[in-house]
Amino acid sequence: MMQESGTETKSNGSAIQNGSSGGNHLLECGSLREGRSNGEAPAVDVGTADLAHVQQQQQALQVARQLLLHQQQQQQVSGLKSPKRNDKQPALQVPVSVAMMTPQVITPQQMQQILQQQVLSPQQLQVLLQQQQALMLQQQQLQEFYKKQQEQLQLQLLQQQHAGKQPKEQQVATQQLAFQQQLLQMQQLQQQHLLSLQRQGLLTIQPGQPALPLQPLTQGMIPTELQQLWKEVTSAHTTEETTGNNHSSLDLTTTCVSSSAPSKTSLIMNPHASTNGQLSVHTPKRESLSHEEHPHSHPLYGHGVCKWPGCEAVCEDFQSFLKHLNSEHALDDRSTAQCRVQMQVVQQLELQLAKDKERLQAMMTHLHVKSTEPKTAPQPLNLVSSVTLSKSASEASPQSLPHTPTTPTAPITPVTQGPSVITTTSMHTVGPIRRRYSDKYNVPISSADIAQNQEFYKNAEVRPPFTYASLIRQAILESPEKQLTLNEIYNWFTRMFAYFRRNAATWKNAVRHNLSLHKCFVRVENVKGAVWTVDEVEFQKRRPQKISGNPSLIKNMQTSHAYCTPLNAALQASMAENSIPLYTTASMGNPTLGNLASAIREELNGAMEHANSNESDSSPGRSPLQAVHPVHVKEEPLDPEEAEGPLSLVTTANHSPDFDHDRDYEDEPVNEDME
DNA sequence: CCAGCCGTAAACATGA
DNA sequence: ATCATGTTTACGGCTG
C-alpha cells in the first residue's frame, strides 16, 4: 500500500515543519491536552474512603473471579497483575463494620473521574448499574415493610388501648418496648438500605420513581431530635419504672412522632392517643387491622448474631436475642450514644445521597437530552437490530442483578444469557483492548463487556477501553458492506460512544491517523468517493504482539497447530501455561466469561495466524476462528465475519441505535440488509 | 532501559 | 478561501 512506500517520501517538507511543530507539541503537552483534561480526570481527589469503596467493588470482582479459577491460575493471575493498579486493593480493603461507620461518599464527579480512569471495568459498572435497579426494588420493599411496621406498631398500641385494664405500668412498659423496637427496626432498616445504596457508590433515581420512604424516615430523625427523643425515652423509662407515670411515656411518643411530623410525615400524633400514647399512622392502610404477628426477623438479629453495631453477640434463638437486646443494649448511655452515632452516620449518608441523587439525575438528564440532539444522520449501518441489543441488555440486567450484587464478575447467570449472548458476540469483535486503560490480562474487558455496556458507553462519557484501530474495524465490520466512508466511521463513533461526542477534532484526527497508519485499513476508491475496508489478515497480524509476551503460548499453538484439534484442551493447557486463567474458566461454562474466552481465542487465533502466517487455512477476512468455532461449546461466533450469512443477524443485533433517531426502529427484530 | 504500541497534535497535500 | 479527507511525522505515556 501507499504507507509502505510513503514513509520515505516527504521527508524534507516535514523535517522543517516538524521542527516547529515539535516545539509546539512540547508546549502543549505540558500545558493542557483538552482531550485528556476532559476525559481523564485530573489528579482525582477522591478520598481514601472513596477509593476503598471502589476498590471493595473491585475486590469483590477479583474474588469472584478467583473463586472460579484453579489455584495455580490464581497465583498466576496475581502474578500478572500490574502491580501499579491492583496491588493496593488488599491493603485498602475495608472491613464492613468500618465501612458502615465511615461516611464514605462518592460524588457523581468523583464517580465520573473514576469511570474515566477505568478504575472500574465497564463490566463492573454495568453491574453497579444493575445493582441500582435492584436497590430500587429493595427500596420499595422497604417502603412496604416500613408501612407494615407502622401498622403493627399501631396495632400494638390499639391492643393496649383496648386492654386498658391492664396495669398502667405494664401497659406503658410494653408500649415503650414496642416503640423502642420499632424505632430500632426502622432505623436499622433505613441504615441497611442506605449502606447498601452507598456501597454501590451510585444511585439512580428514575424519573418515575416515587419519593421513597427514605424521606419520611430520615426527616424525622434529625440528630438533635433524636437526642431529644432518647432523652425523653430514657427519662420516661426511669419515670415509668419508678412512678409509673403514664404521661411521660405519652410525651415520649409525642415527641418522637411530632418531631417527624412537621416534615412530611407519615407519622403523626393521633389526637385521641393523647390519653394513652397511641400512635396513629397516617397511611392509607391506617385503619386496617392486620393481625400479622411480628415476624421473628429482627433487623438487629440475623444468622444467630446480634447485629447491633459493634456487638455481634451470638444468640441461639430469637428469644435469647431479645433477652440479649434488652440486657446488653438497654437504654443506657452507651446504647444511646451508639444509636446517636448511627443516626448521624445515616443522616450524613442520606444528605450526601440526596445530593448525589440530584446530581446524577441532572447528569443523566443532561446526557439524555444531549443524545437526542440531531446528529448528522449517519448512514444506518445495521442499526435496526441494534435495538434488540440495547433492549435485551437492559432487560437482562435487572434479572442478573439480584444474583450477584456484590460480585461483578459472576453476574453472569444463565438468565442474562439469552439476549446478551447476541450482544456480546457481535461487539466482542472489537478486538484489542487499550492496554492503557486496562490490561487485558488483568482486567479482561472484552467486546462482550462493551456489548453489555453498550448502553453505558452510549450514554456515559467514558472512554471506551479499545483502541481506535479496533473501534474502526468494528465499525467497518458492522456495516452491511463491510466498508464505510470516513464520515460514516465518524458517525459510528458518535453513535456508539458518548465519549466521542466531544472533542471531535481530536478523535477524528486520530481516526484518520489510524486509517492511514495501519495497513489493515484499506482505502478503496469508489464512484462516490472512497470507502475504508478492513484487511483482516493485516489486522490479525498486528495482534499477536499483544501476547508476544507469552512465547510459550505461541509455541503451544504452533505445536497444536491444527486449528481443528480439540482447541479447548489446547487452549486450556496453553492458557494455564501462560497465565490466562480466565479463558480457561470461561470456556468451562460461565457464559460471560465465555465471551471473554472468545475474545481471547480471537487473540490467540491472531497469534496463531501470526505464528503460522502463511498457513493456507487463513483466508483474508477470515480468521482461523472459523475452524475453531465449531469445536467450542455453544459459544457465540467470535468474529462478525463468522456471523455472515445466517449469522449475520447476530452481528447485526449488536448495533444498537442509540440514543437518537435510530430508536424508531427499535422494535424491528432484525436487519434484513444482511445477507 | 528499550522497543513497540497507542493516542495526540500538527503540518501538509489534495480535491470538491 | 474553506472544508473534508488523507498522509506523515513527532512525541509522550504505557507496557512487557
Image (cartoon, coloured by chain):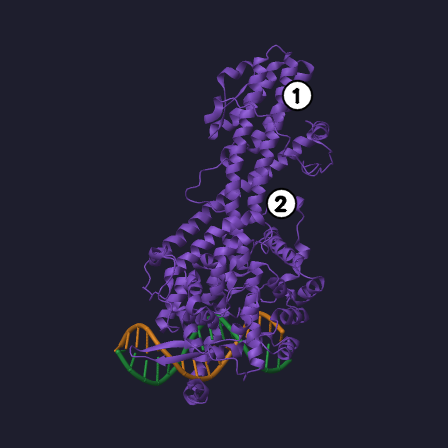
Chain colours: A purple, B green, C orange
Mark 2, other Cα within 10 Å: few <14 / some 14–19 / many ≥20: some
Residue A569: percent from the left, percent from the top?
A: 64, 69
Would you say the residues marked 2 and 1 are in contact, meaning their CB atoms lie under 8 Å apart? no
Q: CA distance from mark 2 to mark 1?
A: 31 Å
Question: Is A583 positioned to the left or the right of A385 in the image?
Answer: right
A235 or A303: which is nearer to us? A303
- Chain to which mark 2 belongs: A
**Whether labels 2 and 1 share one chain:** yes
Q: Secondary structure at mark 1?
A: helix
Q: Quadrant of residue A297?
A: top right
Residue A237's disc is 1
Residue A105 seen: no
Residue A102's disc is 2
User: Mark 2 or 1 closer to N-term?
Assistant: 2
Quadrant containing the N terminus of chain A in the rendered view:
bottom left
- Amino acid under disc 1: His
Residue A295 seen: yes
Relative height, residue B8 to residue A347 (above, below) = below
Question: Is A343 positioned to the left or the right of A511 in the image?
Answer: right
A124 or A389: which is nearer to us? A389
